[in-house]
Image: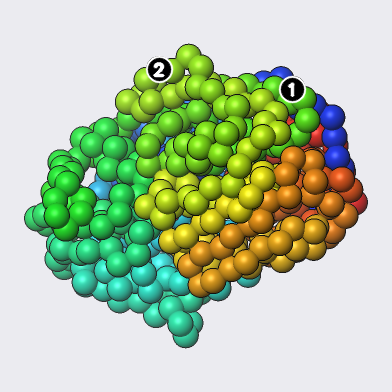
Amino acid sequence: MSGHGTPIPMTSHPCGPLTGEARVPGDKSISHRALILGAMAVGETRITGLLEGEDVIDTAKAMRAFGAEVTDHGGGEWSVHGVGVGGFAEPDQVIDCGNSGTGVRLIMGAMATSPITATFTGDASLNKRPMARVTDPLGLFGATTVGRSGGRLPMTVIGATHPIPVRYTVPVPSAQVKSAVLLAGLNAPGQTVVIEREATRDHSERMLAGFGAEITTEQTEEGRVITLTGQPELKPQTIAVPRDPSSAAFPVCAALVTPGSDVLVPGIGLNPTRAGLFTTLREMGADLTYENEREEGGEPVADLRARYSPDMQGIRVPADRAASMIDEYPVLSVVAANATGTTMMGGVKELRVKESDRIDAMARGLRANGVTVEEGEDWWAVHGLGAGNVPGGGTCESFLDHRIAMSFMVLGMAAQAPVSVDDGGPIATSFPIFEPLMTGLGAKLERT
Ligand SMILES: O=C(O)C1=C[C@@H](OP(=O)(O)O)[C@@H](O)[C@H](O)C1
Ligand SMILES: C=C(OP(=O)(O)O)C(=O)O
């Protein structure tokens, strides 16, 4: 839905300490997958803690269009009455995935091996993003796709009538591509094999196993080899969605750069395929501790405690960590601006094909606020000014990108003058309670 509304300009004023508890919403990646796999199971899946952001709501609507019964029971509790693998009905409307790359790519995969046709579209941001990365492997299963030039949405997918399982090496580090292939493999007879050279988030593999699919992962010289046996009967599950580490990144980073802060962010998943930011921040010298470490639903979880850290140093972030923190680079660059020395971020060309070109979007906005940034195709470097030395005072474009908008709001909290964004509307795609949550901690956010 993002991108269809009137822009919401927002300003973040320098503020005093951020204190208290930040209960961030449910994990976006896990929420999409819970709805989609719930729709492909036979019977009723119950979900608690679902992220009720626009991206996930669009996926819920899509699952209804494919014939699943999706019910909102209130308070983050949802149920999905699934139609079984291969049981999707043909939607009689265009499927609008709004701002969500995960939604559209996973759903295309899930329907591509059923004998139905569906047309997908999104907002101005999503309709610019590359889809060939999923339509190429879906073609190998026997699906046909027709989109705009350059493999862009709107796009029609004609599902395979006689799907054939595939063996596919994912050419870019992308959990969305891996997941699209696995979901397509569900309705192909025999074994579908996906190979990824670099490990990406493994929520699909974990959840497929939970729903009773036969799935194995092996580390070989080729990389991670994931083998899925097609046409299982998926058994409905009860899923408690953990809180999203990518959303936790915002109160955590805000506390690290805002003088006097001490913020607790409880119940955050520390799955190693997602936790790269927190490792990086600790290497920079952040006062970030893990409290009450435990396991919940098979995932490592902790309460994160972040305190103001005026002595952070810039570092070289290892390129092989990129996949585990890919959505966190924008807010890391804000921390880097408040550290001493240069933070060098390499191996990140995927940042150029997110909701915006995130290197370009952050570089422009940081420069507008007095920070020096250098960039190349797959790297960027932020020259830190030291704690409290970011001048601020600039207005930044958010380019229909929630993470860009939220990152600049964090920049303003610790800058010498307010920082504005032209449109904070996209924040609702992943973190609908961002404003009240951050204001509750002591941030001074204003719709302008
Ligand atoms: O699979 C997922 O849930 C996601 C995978 C990542 O995208 P890519 O697969 O394009 O890297 C990430 O950026 C996105 O926010 C969520
Ligand atoms: C990249 C993101 O999401 P998506 O690809 O699902 O639009 C994100 O949430 O940062």
- Image position of 19 with respect to 392: above or below: above
Amino acid type, label 1: Thr
Amino acid type, label 2: Arg
- Image position of 257 with respect to 382: above or below: above
In screen coordinates, is 335 left or right of 283? right
Q: Quadrant of the N terminus?
A: bottom right
In screen coordinates, is 424 left or right of 392? left
Q: Tell me where residue 310 appears, x and y as whole percent.
A: 70, 33
Q: Tell me where residue 407 appears, x and y as whole percent.
A: 68, 49
Local crowd size for mark 1, using a 10 Å CA cut-off: few (<14), some (14–19), many (≥20)? many
**Direction top: furthest residue:** 292
In screen coordinates, is 18 left or right of 40? right
Q: Secondary structure at mark 1?
A: strand
Mark 2 CB in 8 Å range of ligand 1?
no
Q: Tell me where residue 81 appears, x and y as whole percent.
A: 38, 38
In screen coordinates, is 58 left or right of 67? right
User: Mark 1 highlights which residue?
Assistant: 19
Give the camera-side residue of 121 and 346: 346
Q: Secondary structure at mark 2?
A: strand
Give the camera-side residue of 425 and 307: 307
Q: Could you tell me which residue is drawn at 37 percent across and 37 percent down?
A: 272
Res. 294 mark: 2
| Number of numbered discs | 2
- Image position of 253 with respect to 316: above or below: above
Mark 1 vs 2, N-terminal side: 1
- Image position of 220 with respect to 299: above or below: below
Residue 112 is drawn in which quadrant?
A: bottom left
Give the camera-side residue of 242 and 350: 350
